């Protein structure tokens, strides 16, 4: 299985990830396809400049697709591990104008609390391909 690491800074989001993760069809697909029930919120990181091509790579990779109901966009997920091996997944929303340097992470736990993270902290994420 191929993998690679990225680094970025923790930033506050707009709360959109939490709204999305409250949807029953999203929670069900994440549980079925990724094997965990997601915490109701995402950890947002702004990728460091040296990882600017990461989103393009992930858009071309196969990934795990979260199929939407009417009125929503697809999302592509990749299994990942953050910091000390905490299981999580990267979510790439297939939304126009979504920032290329922003990455959202879902996990079965509140990552900010578990890893004692605050805005500005740098974290490393191992992303699995395949």
Image (cartoon, helix red, strand yellow):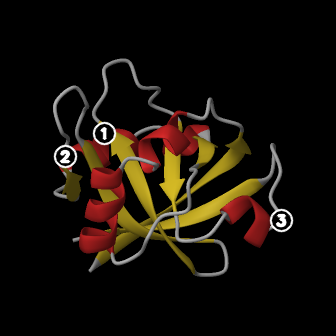
Kind of element beneath mark 3: loop
Relative to 89, does residue 41 appear above or below in the rendering?
above
Disc 2 packing (10 Å; few <14; some 14–19; many ≥20): few
Of the numbered discs 3 and 2, the one sitting upstream in the chain is 2
Measure the alpha-carbon separation of dots 1 and 3: 30 Å
In the displayed structure, does residue 58 sit left or right of residue 47?
left
At x 22%, y 58%, the residue is 63
User: Marks 2 and 1: in contact by CB < 8 Å?
Assistant: yes
Give coordinates of residue 53: x percent, y percent.
40, 40
Give coordinates of residue 87: x percent, y percent.
51, 76
Question: Residue 38's mark?
Answer: none
Disc 3 packing (10 Å; few <14; some 14–19; many ≥20): few
The residue nearer to you, when weighing 118 against 110, is: 110
Relative to 20, does residue 64 appear above or below in the rendering?
below
Kind of element beneath mark 2: helix
Q: Quadrant of the C terminus?
A: bottom left
- Label 2 sits on residue: 60
At x 19%, y 46%, the residue is 60
The extreme front residue here reads: 24
The residue nearer to you, when weighing 73 against 103, is: 73
Measure the alpha-carbon separation of dots 3 and 2: 33 Å
Of the numbered discs 1 and 3, the one sitting upstream in the chain is 1
Q: Quadrant of the N terminus?
A: bottom left
Question: Residue 56's mark?
Answer: 1
Measure the alpha-carbon separation of dots 1 and 2: 6 Å
Judged by depth in the image, the label closer to the viewer, 1 or 3, is: 3
At x 59%, y 81%, the residue is 85
Give coordinates of residue 29: x percent, y percent.
26, 61
Relative to 73, does residue 91 appear above or below in the rendering?
below
- Label 3 sits on residue: 116
At x 24%, y 70%, the residue is 33
Q: In this figure, what is the number of numbered marks?
A: 3
């Amino acid at each position: 299985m191929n993998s690679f690491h990225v680094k970025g800074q923790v930033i506050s989001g707009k709360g959109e990830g939490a709204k999305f993760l409250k949807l029953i069809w999203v929670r069900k697909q994440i549980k079925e396809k990724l094997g965990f029930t997601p915490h109701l919120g995402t950890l947002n990181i702004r990728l460091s400049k040296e990882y600017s091509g990461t989103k393009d790579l992930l858009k071309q990779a196969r990934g795990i697709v979260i199929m939407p109901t009417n009125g929503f966009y697809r999302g592509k997920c990749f299994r990942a591990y953050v910091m000390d091996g905490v299981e999580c997944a990267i979510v790439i929303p297939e939304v126009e104008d979504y920032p290329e340097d922003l990455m959202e992470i879902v996990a079965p736990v509140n990552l900010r609390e578990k890893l004692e993270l605050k805005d500005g902290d740098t974290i490393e994420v191992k992303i699995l391909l395949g």
